[in-house]
Amino acid sequence: MEEVYVLGIGMTPFGKHPDKTAADLGAEAVNLALADAGVSRQDIEAAWVGHVYQGMAMGQRALYAAGLSGIPIDNVENACSSGSTAIWDAAMALRAGAYDIVLALGVEHLTNLFRGAFAPDPSDVEAQIGLTMPGIYAMRAQRYMVQYGVTSEQIAQIAVKNKKNAAMNPLSHFKKPVTLEEVMQGRLIADPLHLHECAPVSDGAAAVVMVSKAKLHQLGSSRAIKLAGTALKSGRTEVGLADMTVEDLTWRTAQTAYEQSGVGPGDIDFAEVHDCFSIAEALRVEGMGLVPHGEYVARVGKGEMDINGSFPVNASGGLLGKGHPLGATGVAQVVELVKQLRGEAGERQIQNAKVGVAHCRGGKAQGVEGTACTVNILVA
C-alpha cells in the first residue's frame, strides 16, 4: 500500500467560542493546516470532515468558509471517533491511490447546544434508565479499585497530571493546574468521579493535510511525519458479563495498527489517549498493551506518565485538560503527535520522541462494547 504522511497541521484553541460558528472554527483550522503544509487550497483533491452534532453539510460549510469548494467532501459521524475516522478514511483513499493530497478536519461547537452531560439517545434503553457515560465510567472505576486495590485518590492523580500539562498548552480549554485536594473536593458527578475527572463540553477544530509518498517527494518537504499505522474497529456484540477493566475493542484496534506499522507496544515512546474520564486513561493505555493490566494508576503516582517521565501520556492535557469538542478530538490528538515528533511542542516537548500513538474511542450503542475506536501510529 502507498505510504501516507501528515504534511500540515492546524488547530484552534479549544474552549468556549460564543462569538464563532462551527464553520468559523473549521475554516480557521483548515487555513492553519494549509499554511503549515505550504500548499494552496487548489492543491487539495478531497476532504473528510468529522463532526457529531453540527447538522447537515457541516463539511461543505466549513470548507466554503475556508475558500474550498467543488471537491469531494465526505461528512463523517462516528461518535467521539468522528475526527480520527476522517483521518482513517483519508488515509485509505491515499493508500488506494485515489488521491495524492487530501484534508481531514474535525470540528464541533458544543457550548451552544449543551450545558451539561449529553442526553442519551431515546432508543438506548440502558441509558434511559441511568447507564449514561458518567455512570458507566464510575462503575468501571469502582471495579478497577476493587480488582487492583487502588483508591479514588490515586485515580484522581490522572486529572492532576493532565490539567498540569494543559496549563502549558496555549490551545487548551483549561489553563490552570489543579491539586489533588482540589480534585477530591470538587463536585461528585458519579461516585468516585469528581468534576475535574470528567471531560468538559468544548468548542474547537483541528485539521491535517495528508499526502502520499510520491506527492511528498514532489513537494520536497522535510517536516512531514509518517502515518505508519491507522486502524478503525467497532464494538462486538456483548455476550454475558464482561470484565469492565478490560477493553477488547481497544486491544483489537491497536493490534491492527501495530501490524500495519511494524512496531509493537514496546516501541511506542508516548501516547495521546481518549481520557473522557480519569479512569478511561488507565483503561486505554492498558488496553493497548502499553502497561500491564492493573499497573497504570500506580505508575501515574510515581510520575512515570509525566512529560519528563519514562512514558508520557496526554502531554497535550488530554480531553480532561485540553478539552473535548467531540468531532475535533481525534484530529487534535494527531496534531499533538506531529508537534512532538517534529520537536515543536515547546515546554511540553517530550525528549527523544520518535514513535507516538493516538487512541480515540467514543460513543455508546446498546448491545455492543463500544461504538467506534481508532488507533493511529506516527513515526518521525
Image: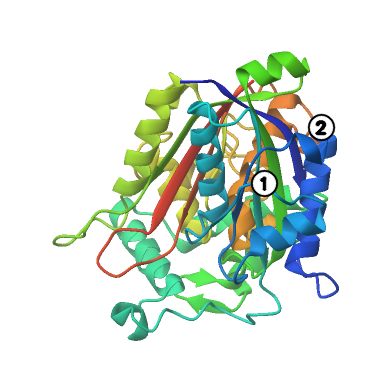
Q: Distance between the residues labelled 1 and 2?
A: 16 Å
Whether residue 162 is situated above or below residue 356 in the rendered picture: below
Question: Quadrant of residue 220 in the image?
Answer: top right
Relative side of 252 to 339, left or right: left
Q: Nearer the viewer, residue 315 or 80?
A: 80
x then y, percent, for residue 349 = 75, 32
Residue 307 showing in the rendered view: no
Mark 2 — residue? Answer: 39
Counting every numbered tag in the picture gives: 2
Mark 1 — residue? Answer: 71
Q: Nearer the viewer, residue 305 or 203?
A: 203
Residue depicted at x 69% and y 55%? 322
Rate crowding at label 1 as few (under 14), some (14 to 19) or many (20 or more) other CA atoms within 10 Å. Answer: few
Residue 313 showing in the rendered view: yes
Decide which of tag 1 and tag 2 comes sooner along the chain.
2
Whether residue 228 is situated above or below residue 112 in the rendered picture: above
Relative side of 230 to 66, left or right: left
x then y, percent, for residue 215 = 68, 20
> Which amino acid type corresponds to the residue marked 2 in the rendered image?
Val
Residue depicted at x 68% and y 67%? 202
Q: Which of 225 and 105 is in front in this view?
A: 105
Labels 1 and 2 touching (C-beta < 8 A) = no
**Secondary structure under the numbered disc 1 in the rendered image:** loop
